[in-house]
Image (cartoon, helix red, strand yellow):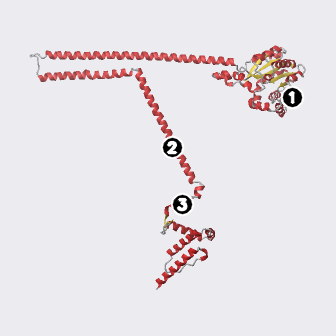
Amino acid sequence: MTNHFYRAFEDRYRGSREVIKQRLYKYVPFLQALRSHCPDASAIDLGCGRGEWLEVLGEQGLSARGVDLDQGMLAAARERGLEVSEQDALAALAGLPDQSVAVVSAFHLVEHIPFDTVRALVAEALRVLVPGGLLILETPNPENIVVGSSDFYTDPSHLRPIPPNLLAFVAEHAGYARHAVVRLQEDPNLHEGARIDLLTVLSGASPDYSIVAQKNADAGLLASFEQLFLAVYGVDTKSLALRYESQAAQQHAEIHHALAALSERISLDRASTAAEHQLVSQNLVDLGNAHAGLAATLAQTIARLDQLEAPHQLPDQQSLAARIERLEQHADSSQSLDLAARIDKLERHAAESQPSELAACLAELDRVRAQLQQTTSELEARLAQEKQLSAMHAQQITALLQSRSWRITAPLRLLGTLARQVRGNDGEGSTGLSATAKTLARRGVQAVMRRPRLKRVALALLAHMPSVRTRLRGLLHRQDALHHPVNAPPAEPLPIGEVAPRVARIYRELKQAQQARNDRCAS
């Protein structure tokens, strides 16, 4: 691909530069062991992509360069100042001399090329590697069932997954001295004995792996890599499945043990119940024997009384009745009360010894208790909801009363309230303001008239509303007539030009009537 699609695809689905670079530090022990024998080691990275591995090689002191065919990836690597070029991987290896590099690497490349090309690449890498040099081939791990069946095919450039055993055999067949399968990127918790479920068996194996193969060299150099090639890396599906089966078997054993303990307890409870039933039966037998003994005692007493009925031994009737009464009282006091108590106790014991009835009573009690608890919870929830609504309404009212709009409209609301309360009849059949409203209106007009600036504004507005101006002047004149005495000097005449003709006429008539009244009073 020659556009930036694959670079954007890698950013989305493979991970950021920081994440990928952190994963690559897994190979640092191999590089450190190699550097101890080859201080001036160099490396070539095939399909270098954005250059994360080139940065790691540089940090470990290796001279590294990369090749790739994607312009977007190469642009990302050049942004980091890395040495990269546009070149085919196999062609780049073919152009290198024998035993010229210490590391040949290809991360997530082999799944993009045909299998025969993979074999040719592995063979060419063996040629250009120095003795003891390393070949690193990383690719998605199809041992992970989700990766092998689904995630692998998210990348449209993937051809087919390569199992670890196959890629390892390719390196072995090509002539490498040894190899290690390094499984990567699994969940770290799987190494700590975490419980395995079925989903972990399907998707928990290491999602990536690599084949690290080493070219043959002298025994001393190879010995320094011994522990690295003997180590076990990552987690495969088989080990997860075995752990899952082991944990399942242990869980089944625990369940069987618990069931056996429960069965034993049930057996003990049954034996105890049988013993209790046997005890109840024995008590019932003892009760029957006690009844029989009491009946025998009464029979003997009656027989003795019959013997005493002989003439020479017969006492008087009162004495005989008294003895019978004493015998009955003695029988009642000595046996009956004790007998009744024993019967009641045995009956209670028998009732308590019925497991099925007891279980039913307990079940009914639990059901009623649960219903009561549910009802209580519902009432508490309803009460909490009501309190919350009440608090919300109080907050809304408080916010309204404190708002600027409420303060601004306060005069309008006051005038509206007064208008509704004092609306009445003006005496001519038409609806008008009552005395209270008129008084308020007069005071308002007088307050305006005392302020020259407001007076000018009010007169300018009233010039466009003759009827309102007439009404207000009438209110002022009526107020003056009420407060001035009869013999007071006449008020200064109003300019006739400032009132309506009808008002001027009424004013003149009122003035004439007032003058006539003053004349009559004077005569």
> x, y percentage for residue 85?
87, 29
Q: Disc 3 designates what residue?
A: 416
Which numbered marker is on residue 63? none
The answer to whether residue 77 is left or right of residue 326 is right
The answer to whether residue 142 is left or right of residue 478 is right
Q: CA distance from mark 2 to mark 1?
A: 73 Å
> x, y percentage for residue 438?
52, 68
Q: Label 1 sits on what residue type?
A: Glu
Q: What secondary structure is found at the residue carrying circle 1?
A: strand
Eye-nearest disc, 3 or 2: 3
Q: Quadrant of the N terminus?
A: top right
Answer with the quarter of the image where residue 17 lies: top right
Q: What secondary structure is found at the residue carrying circle 2?
A: helix
Eye-nearest disc, 1 or 3: 3
Would you place residue 80 above or below residue 354 in this image? below
> x, y percentage for residue 109?
80, 24
Q: CA distance from mark 1 to mark 3?
A: 86 Å
Q: Earlier in the sequence, mark 1 or mark 3?
A: 1
Q: Is residue 226 visible?
A: no
Q: What secondary structure is found at the residue carrying circle 3?
A: helix
Q: Earlier in the sequence, mark 3 or mark 2?
A: 2
Q: Disc 1 designates what residue?
A: 86
Q: CA distance from mark 3 to mark 2?
A: 34 Å
Query: Quick one: label 1, few (<14), some, or many (20+) residues within 10 Å?
Result: some
Q: Label 3 sits on what residue type?
A: Gly
Q: Disc 2 designates what residue?
A: 386
Residue in the image at 54% along x and 76% along y = 506
> x, y percentage for residue 339?
28, 21
The residue nearer to you, when weighing 348 against 420, is 420
